[in-house]
Each structure stands twice: as C-alpha cells, then as structure tokens.
Image: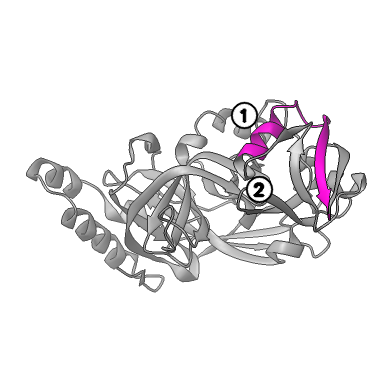
Amino acid sequence: MRVVATPVGSWRTVGFLMLALLLVTVGDQARAAEAERIDPERVVRSVVGIRAVVPPDSQSSQTLGTERTGSGVVIDGSGLILTIGYTVMEASQITVTAADGRDFPATLSAYDPVSGFGLLRAGLGFQAPWLRLADSHQVKEGDTLLVVTGGEARGAAAVHVVGKREFAGYWEYLLDEALFTFPPIRAFNGAALVNGDGRLVGVGSLLVGEAVQGRGVPGNMFVPVSALEPILADLLAYGRRQEPPRPWLGVTLREETGRILVEKVSPRGPAETAGVRPGDWIVGVGGQGVGGLADFYRKLWSLGPAGTVVPLDVMRGEALTPVPVTSGDRVRFLRLTPTL
C-alpha cells in the first residue's frame, strides 16, 4: 500500500478514500454500517501541517535542524493541536496550515519529554473539527488503521499494526508500549493514526528499521494517545506534567549486544560537566550491571528525581572508572520560550 499524496484543496477525495479503506478491512455488516456513519471530511480536516523555525543556537538545532515540518491533530474545539514534540521544541516561530491551505501562527503550550508529545494553540481565526481520543490499549497486532498527514505531504494511507512493545530511544527516552506499523510512511512526524471509529489512536514519531521485532522490516513508531490522557490536565494548566522530573544526563546512546556506548554528550549538560566522553561504555549504575537501554533507563530513573547524583560505572579501554553525574532536568536545558 502507498501514501496517497493528495494536493491541498482536494481533501474531500482523501476523506472518501479513507472511508473506502476502512470498509475494505471490515468484515461484518454491522461494523460496516457503523463505518458509514463516520464523517471522513472531519477526520481529514482535523489534521494540520506544521512548520517550525528554531534558533541556530538552541540545543536541539544541532541534531534536528533549524527548520522543521510535520503534522498535528486538533483534539478539542478551542484549537488545541497535538503533535510530536521534537517538531516544535525550542521553536521561535510556529505556523499551522489548515486543510484549506490557510496559514495561522501558533504557540507552544506544552512539551512533555516523557511521552514525547507537544501541544500547540493555533492563533486567531483558526477553525477546524477535532478528533476524539481512542483507547489505544484496545489496538491489536494485525489491525488495519489509517495514517493521515497534513501540510505539503497531506494524504492518507492504510497501515497494519505489526507490533506493540516497549521502545527505548537513544536520547534517554522509553515507552512501555509503542505502536509499530507497516508499510513505512515518510511524512511520519506528528501524523495521525486513526482507527475505524474515526478516533485518534496515536501520533507519529519515527521511521524505524525494525517494525517487526527480530526482522529487518521498516515501518513507523507511533506514540499511543493513552500516554496523553493521564497528563493532559497538567499540560494544559502548567505546560508540563506535575511530578518530579526524571534525572537527565544529556547523552546520546547506542545499544550494541546489550552494551551501551556513549556516542555524544550535550554541550554544558550534566554528563559533559561530570567528564563523560563520547566513546565511553556505560556498564553499570552504582555497581549494578545494565542489560540494554531500557534496563539502564529504569535503573537511572529509579534513583530519584532530577538533581540526584547518578553513580555511573564507565569502561574506558580496559579501565573501569566510576563517574558520578549530578543529573539535571531535561526541560530546563531547553529554550522552550526562545522569543522571551
């Protein structure tokens, strides 16, 4: 199956294509009748394009660039837009493109490094229908869902859920359960993953080389919206979740056969300040061995909140070196309001 790249302005065609794809995957007549009641126009118009401009001296510009594009999903009647946070993180200018092609300024309302979600508010005059959130726990391997993208890549495509499992990212990130889909969608970041009821199941995060565990099958990773619901009230009220922030080291890591290699350290971050270097191997935390990224993160975060001293066991050549790192709060190292 392929992405249908439909030009802006012909979203009605995309909407009815979405409905057709849904009906093809539905077996019983009752379920098909329910699908016919879905308003495909509403689904398509709820997905917007996003363009973000990020100052070159920001932390994330070194890895994510200064000009970023993606999609977002309107999730309430006031113009609240859910996207993947790295698209808009540290942006000094954000523009939202509605389904009719009109552009609106937007502001970053919240960023959550734990889930990876970001929330935007579109500016005056923006109007769009919104999608309800689904119970993403109900998604099963083998389900057929729809990916809807906005902006210049506006379109829709059917995908299959090929995995539900934990995901550990190299940037000190861990999801207990992520959704993996096939075939791969190139315009993945912030894309809407929609179920047969026309509800939002997940938000696009990554293109991955191993969507099916243990096999080199490319696909996408989506963050389930179930990760948003417990924290949404906090994000709306405070711009971040109201619980002690996790200890952050400021390292980019790679897992190799269960071992953890430090590939990069964030400038002026906790790890660099403590003397951690690219090329170090992290083999333990406080004398406890680590078995891969997920195990390392769980041991790291179990030590306490941000500010906790993390006793890393680092291998340099043949020497085992203890390196105590005074951890930080990741959000405080980001310029989330760079225009101020």
Question: Depth-wise, is mark 2 or mark 1 nearer the camera?
Answer: 1
User: Relative to the observer, which residue lies in front, 141 or 136?
Assistant: 141
User: Relative to the observer, which residue lies in front, 66 or 282?
Assistant: 282
Q: Is residue 304 magenta?
A: yes
Residue 72 rendering spot, x and y as whole percentages: 51, 54
Residue 227 rendering spot, x and y as whole percentages: 51, 36
**Disc 2 marks which amino acid?**
Leu
Farthest-out residue, front: 318
Instruction: Note whether residue 197 is visible.
Output: yes
Residue positioned 65% across, 42% down in the render? 113
Circle number at residue 46: none
| Direction from residue 29 to residue 91 in the image, left or right | right
**Disc 1 marks which amino acid?**
Asp
Callout 2 secondary element: strand
Callout 1 secondary element: helix
Q: Are marks 2 and 1 in contact (CB under 8 Å)?
A: no
Residue 211 rendering spot, x and y as whole percentages: 43, 56
Q: Which residue is mark 1?
A: 234
Question: What whole-number distance in Å separates the C-alpha atoms at marks 2 and 1?
Answer: 15 Å
Residue 182 rendering spot, x and y as whole percentages: 37, 60
Residue positioned 34% across, 51% down in the render? 161
Q: Residues within 10 Å of mark 1 (few under 14, many from 20)?
A: some
The magenta stretch is: 295-317
Considering only order in the chain, which callout, 1 or 2, is on the residue closer to the N terminus? 2
In the displayed structure, 26 sits above or below 51; it is above
| Direction from residue 175 to residue 171 in the image, left or right | right
In the displayed structure, 12 sits above or below 35; it is below
Q: Quadrant of residue 320?
A: top right
Q: Which residue is mark 2?
A: 108
